[in-house]
Amino acid sequence: MAHYLVELFVSRLGTGGLDEAAACARRAAGELSRRGTPVHYLCSIFVPEDETWFLLYDAPSVAAVQQAVERAALPCERVLKAVMPQ
């Protein structure tokens, strides 16, 4: 599986909802995994100065991550393949 980075602008969510939104992202990934598409929510990083929130996933494809984000009802700007050097 590969790593994917999801970019969201928090001004659309409101910063007060980040914990709940992260929980939704985690649940949605778990649901897809149980249904046979292995998507794993790894972590998130919020950059307040830019009002940007990044979510990191392991998944077989961009489409699988997009499906998880849609299931979590998050306003995703883009999903990008990411590399995590050792």
Image: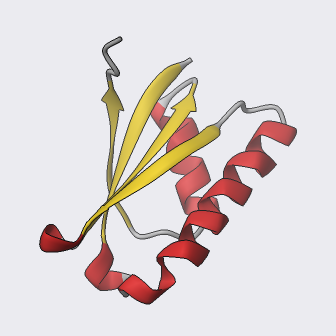
Give the residue at the far top of this rendering.
86
- Locate residue 78, reporting x and y percent: 31, 51
Q: Is residue 35 above or below residue 51?
A: above
Q: Residue furthest right?
A: 34
Q: Which quadrant, please, contains the N terminus? A: top right
Q: Horizontal placement of 14 versus 28: left or right?
A: left
Quadrant in which the C terminus is drawn: top left
Residue 86 appears left or right of 38: left
In the image, residue 47 sits, relative to residue 13, either above or below, namely above
Identify the image's colour scheme: rainbow, by chain, secondary structure or one colour. Answer: secondary structure
Residue under the image location 57 percent in, 29 percent down: 59
Name the residue at 73% across, 33% down: 37
Name the outermost residue toward the front: 86
Q: Is 12 or 18 nearer to us in this picture?
A: 18
Outermost left residue: 49
Say left or right for 27 vs 47. Answer: right
Residue 54 spot, x, y in % from top left:
35, 54
Q: Quadrant of residue 58?
A: top right
20 left or right, relative to 7: right
Residue at position x 41%, y 70% from top? 75
Q: Position of residue 5 (x, y in %)?
A: 37, 41
